[in-house]
Image (cartoon, grey):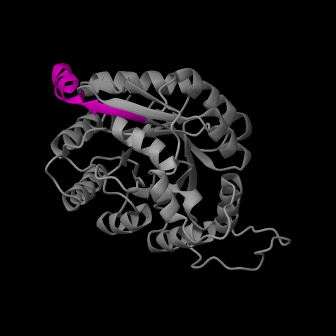
């Protein structure tokens, strides 16, 4: 049985290249993803980093919608804690009006940056809303179902799109899966952040318990090449870095230096940095296909979002093309 494939792109800035070049490469990748049969193309949100160019997914989504004609385009995702749920709903209603049936509104709980950028994003706000409250309010705004007794009852969310954007909660824990299922939104488990399949199984079970008909996607790190040896060499020693503060805050970052800077900006001296080799699906397209078939059978999902954790554009394009040829143009 077949399954859908989609892409997540973070607009990585390769050594010696500029943010302009990284964004042009994202545009090319989206156009090729449409040509090669991928279902969705998502872009991410990161702040105050010289490694990634995607700081505003809603702006980039708008441009990518204009450069494509069929593929779904969305955020993977908007970091909702920083923003007004009303404004996010307006932004994506506008996008869905410009491109009906093609817009995904993915949201996440992570900060998407270091404490100082979080402070800057939220600077001047008079109150901080709980993330769950924000998620509920966002869904109510998008669905047009704000309770009559709500303090904001009566406010309109314009424009009214022909079809509403699909809402996804992105997460990497059982708690995020339960949150998505409780409030009736679609869910994407970020396996490229948390590769523990026991946690993934618990998250899938928790989500399906309350939302048997919701869309459930697994985002996986993948790198395919023409030979297994080439793929292994290209993947190298990709690392996942996680910093845990004594306050209980835990965040996944790209480098040890970022993790240490996160703790410094948070004003915490007692922290733990864990660095491990990234659990990437690496090999030929047929080897990648076999692993995706295994994951599909194990976790009963119909779609994977592929994230290629390599900045080199030629490597990413070739990987995406090979996987398309092995899976999307063949019967699984």
Residue at image point 84% right, 72% down: 148
In the current view of this chain or complex, which residue is farthest to the left?
16
Q: Is residue 154 above or below residue 248?
A: below
* Residue 151 locus on image (x, y percent): 80, 74
* Residue 250 locus on image (x, y percent): 54, 37
Membership of 225 in magenta stretch: yes
- The quadrant in which residue 235 appears is top left
Residue at image point 46% right, 33% down: 242
Q: Which image quarter holds the C terminus?
A: top left
Q: Is residue 208 above or below residue 159?
A: above
* Residue 155 locus on image (x, y percent): 71, 79
Q: Is residue 262 above or below residue 61?
A: above
In the current view of this chain or complex, which residue is farthest to the right?
149
The front one of 107 and 5 is 107
Is residue 177 in view?
A: yes
Membership of 108 in magenta stretch: no
The front one of 249 and 51 is 249
- The quadrant in which residue 84 appears is bottom right
Q: Which range of residues does the magenta coloring cover?
A: 220-235
User: Is residue 18 toward the left or the right of residue 60 in the image?
Assistant: left
Q: Is residue 263 above or below residue 159?
A: above
User: Is residue 260 toward the left or the right of residue 28 in the image?
Assistant: right
* Residue 136 locus on image (x, y percent): 70, 57
Is residue 305 in view?
A: no
The front one of 293 and 183 is 183
């Amino acid at each position: 049985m077949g399954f859908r494939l989609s892409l997540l792109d973070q607009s990585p800035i390769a050594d010696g290249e500029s943010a302009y070049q990284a964004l042009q490469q994202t545009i090319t990748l989206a156009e090729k993803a449409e040509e090669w049969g991928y279902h969705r193309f998502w872009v991410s949100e990161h702040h105050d980093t010289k490694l990634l160019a995607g700081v505003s997914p809603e702006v980039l989504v708008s441009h990518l919608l204009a450069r494509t004609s069929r593929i779904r385009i969305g955020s993977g995702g908007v970091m909702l804690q920083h923003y007004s749920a009303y404004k996010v709903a307006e932004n994506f209603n506008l996008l869905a009006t410009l491109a009906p049936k093609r817009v995904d509104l993915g949201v996440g709980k992570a900060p998407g940056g270091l404490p100082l950028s979080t402070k800057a994003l939220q600077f001047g706000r008079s109150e901080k809303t709980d993330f769950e409250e924000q998620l509920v309010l966002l869904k109510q705004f998008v669905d047009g179902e704000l309770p009559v007794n709500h303090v904001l009852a009566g406010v309109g969310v314009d424009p009214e799109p022909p079809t509403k954007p699909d809402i996804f909660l992105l997460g990497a824990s059982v708690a995020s899966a339960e949150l998505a299922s409780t409030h009736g939104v679609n869910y994407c488990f970020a396996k490229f952040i948390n590769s523990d399949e026991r946690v993934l199984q618990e998250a899938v079970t928790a989500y399906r318990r309350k939302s048997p008909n919701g869309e459930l996607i697994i985002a996986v790190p993948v790198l395919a090449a023409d030979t297994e040896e080439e793929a292994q060499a290209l993947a190298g020693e990709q690392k996942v870095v996680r910093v845990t503060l004594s306050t209980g805050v835990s965040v996944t970052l790209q480098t040890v230096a970022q993790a240490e800077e996160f703790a410094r900006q948070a004003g915490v001296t007692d922290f733990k940095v864990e660095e491990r080799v990234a659990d990437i699906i690496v090999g030929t397209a047929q080897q990648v296909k076999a692993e995706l078939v295994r994951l599909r059978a194990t976790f009963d999902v119909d779609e994977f979002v592929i994230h290629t954790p390599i900045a080199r554009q030629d490597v990413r394009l070739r990987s995406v093309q090979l996987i398309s040829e092995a899976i999307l143009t063949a019967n699984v």
